[in-house]
Image (cartoon, helix red, strand yellow):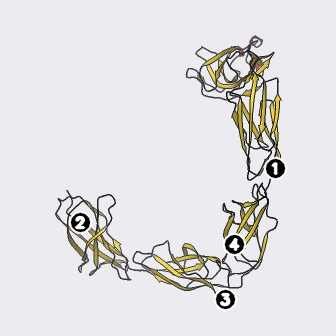
């Protein structure tokens, strides 16, 4: 790549700033309207002051020069010719110059504006302006490329900045000076010249730019580089759907393929992150390997178009992919079964198919698991994707109750529903469960007891003749629950079982040996300290 180089010089170094920072601890906090900057005259550097504050006179003003980031004052400067103004309003908008500034080294310094220095009324506006201590700055810059693309997005500008020393008049590196770059209306990229006056400015393009120029400057020194943005052509290969598709109305037809780009070296390479649209709607985006996979709803007959979205760095494919869709077949549910287990988990199984006709392999449909308390008013309890012709088993996010209604509903096709299933079991509950006594010596007999109840209608009744299991988990790291024994409930639903206390741990009673008409239940976790 051919490198571009330009040299620009100027005889005047100017910089203006009105930055406000925290004042010194001894001074009042201020935000002065007056401001300072630096200028050259007769081969010497001065500080210029422009007066905008009506509560002071220029004769009240002192300027302190510091290194950036430091507190040591390197020079204290007064203003010349301040006697021409007797009131503050007389001096408004007027400029005053200091005598020549002498500093130990070339660089960019900060200027504090001090009013009534050394008095009880002293105020300080820190970092009021910048002092560029150097004459005849010279900016030399080179760009590492003239063209950007998807493969090469960064233009790096390297260069040096030098200036003539006001004391010795030798040309030296201009350390600490800020160099800026901008491409059209994009944000500034900034850097600072190092001790050798060198700088490097990487500029990251985003692909939306058009051919223009990259400007790099310091004060009035400007270097411009032409930059060309190359858009890489895209190509799309569609694996599916075919040019003619028959699919159930409301089903999701699979779309898969690959998008490649013509790289800078002329070869075909994968194009990642490219949007794929069907009939103008976003379907998906390509993966890093250029492949894409998605599905679009078959809701109308006629021509359907698959095309690529407009992305930065890329041109669109030469032509879209058009195909014909026919929605002759009707969706239907078959072999649907539903049940609720003892842990209140509701599960559906079945198959989504068509009443007639065929469909492309991989065609899917969105299915809602609907719930109703009365069999009339339905709400969705969850959704899943079913592949046509492939058996499915899905659990509902909603837990089962004592008795309610459930069904499946095709979200893309109106009126396609499964038969209604009424599901439910009776609730059970372990009450008054306890392990006693508490805080016992090792070897002591413990009694695990409680009462098992079942809900019948709105009333709770004792549940006799049922097996309740007793579990224990030791108070050691990594311990798991272990069944230690069981007890059968009496006529009044109570149960008890004795064990020997061997170690600290947690106890719990569980009713899990249920019949299909009842739910399982667990008691509370009861910790017993064994001494």
Residue displayed at 54% across by 78% down? 377
Sequence-first tag of 4 and 1: 1
Say which element carries label 3: loop
Mark 3 to mark 1: distance in Å? 54 Å
Task: From this view, report whether residue 184 is shown above or below residue 434.
Answer: above
- Image quadrant holding the N terminus, namely top right
Sequence-first tag of 2 and 1: 1
- Check whether the beta carbons of the residues at disc 2 and disc 3 lie within 8 A of each other: no
Mark 4 to mark 3: distance in Å? 23 Å
Q: Position of residue 277 (x, y in %)?
A: 73, 67
Mark 2 to mark 1: distance in Å? 79 Å
Left or right side of 315 for 408 = left
Circle 4 Cα neighbour tier, 10 Å, few/some/many (<14 / 14–19 / ≥20): many
Tell which of 129 and 531 is nearer to you. 531
Residue labelled with disc 2: 435
Residue labelled with disc 1: 210
Task: From this view, report whether residue 208 is shown above or below residue 304.
Answer: above
Tell which of 162 and 20 is nearer to you. 162
Residue labelled with disc 3: 356
Task: From this view, report whether residue 23 is shown above or below residue 180.
Answer: above
Residue displayed at 67% across by 24% down? 109
Q: Position of residue 386 (x, y in %)?
A: 59, 77
Sequence-first tag of 3 and 1: 1
Report the mark closest to the observer, 3 or 1: 1
Say which element carries label 2: strand
Residue labelled with disc 4: 255
């Amino acid at each position: 790549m051919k490198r571009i180089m330009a040299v620009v010089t100027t005889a005047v170094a100017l910089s203006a700033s009105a930055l406000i920072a925290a004042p010194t601890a001894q001074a009042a906090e201020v935000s002065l309207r007056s401001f300072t900057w630096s200028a050259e005259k007769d081969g010497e550097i001065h500080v210029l002051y422009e007066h905008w504050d009506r509560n002071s006179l220029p004769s009240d003003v002192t300027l302190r020069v510091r290194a950036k980031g430091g507190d040591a004052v390197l020079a204290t400067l007064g203003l010349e010719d301040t006697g021409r103004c007797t009131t503050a309003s007389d001096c408004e908008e007027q400029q005053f110059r200091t005598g020549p500034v002498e500093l130990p080294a070339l660089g960019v310094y900060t200027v504090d504006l001090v009013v009534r220095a050394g008095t009880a009324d002293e105020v300080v506006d820190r970092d009021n302006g910048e002092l560029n201590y150097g004459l005849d700055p010279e900016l030399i810059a080179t760009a590492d490329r003239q063209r950007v693309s998807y493969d090469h997005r960064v233009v790096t500008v390297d260069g040096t900045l030098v200036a003539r020393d006001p004391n010795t008049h030798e040309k030296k590196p201009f350390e600490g000076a800020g160099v800026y770059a901008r491409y059209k209306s994009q944000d500034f990229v900034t850097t600072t010249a190092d001790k050798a006056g060198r700088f490097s400015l990487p500029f990251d393009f985003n692909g939306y730019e058009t051919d223009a120029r990259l400007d790099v400057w310091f004060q009035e020194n400007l270097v411009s580089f032409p930059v060309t943005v190359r858009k890489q052509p895209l190509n799309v290969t569609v694996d599916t759907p075919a040019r003619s598709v028959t699919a159930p109305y409301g089903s999701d037809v699979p779309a898969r393929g690959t998008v490649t780009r013509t790289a800078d070296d002329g070869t075909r390479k994968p194009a990642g992150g490219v949007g794929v649209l069907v009939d103008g709607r976003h379907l998906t985006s390509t993966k890093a390997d250029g492949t894409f996979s998605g599905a679009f709803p078959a809701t109308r007959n006629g021509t359907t178009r698959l095309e690529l979205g407009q992305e930065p760095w890329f041109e669109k494919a030469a032509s879209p992919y058009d195909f014909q869709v026919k929605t002759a077949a009707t969706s239907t549910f078959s072999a649907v079964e539903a049940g609720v287990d003892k842990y209140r988990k509701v599960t559906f199984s079945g198959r989504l198919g068509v009443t007639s006709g065929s469909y492309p392999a991989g065609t899917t449909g969105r299915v809602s698991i609907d719930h109703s308390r009365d069999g009339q008013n339905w709400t969705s309890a969850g959704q899943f994707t079913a592949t046509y012709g492939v058996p499915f088993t899905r659990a509902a996010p909603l837990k089962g109750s004592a008795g309610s209604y459930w069904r499946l509903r095709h979200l893309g096709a109106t009126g396609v529903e499964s038969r209604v299933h009424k599901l439910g079991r009776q609730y059970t509950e372990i009450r008054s469960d306890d392990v006693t006594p508490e805080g016992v010596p090792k070897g002591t007999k413990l009694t695990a007891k409680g009462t098992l109840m079942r809900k019948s209608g709105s009333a709770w009744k004792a549940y006799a003749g049922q097996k309740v299991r007793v579990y224990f988990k030791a108070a050691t790291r990594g311990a798991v629950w272990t069944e230690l024994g069981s007890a059968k409930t009496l006529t009044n639903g109570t149960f008890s079982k004795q064990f020997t206390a061997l170690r600290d741990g947690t106890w719990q009673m569980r009713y899990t040996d249920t019949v299909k008409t009842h739910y399982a239940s667990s008691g509370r976790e009861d910790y017993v300290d064994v001494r």
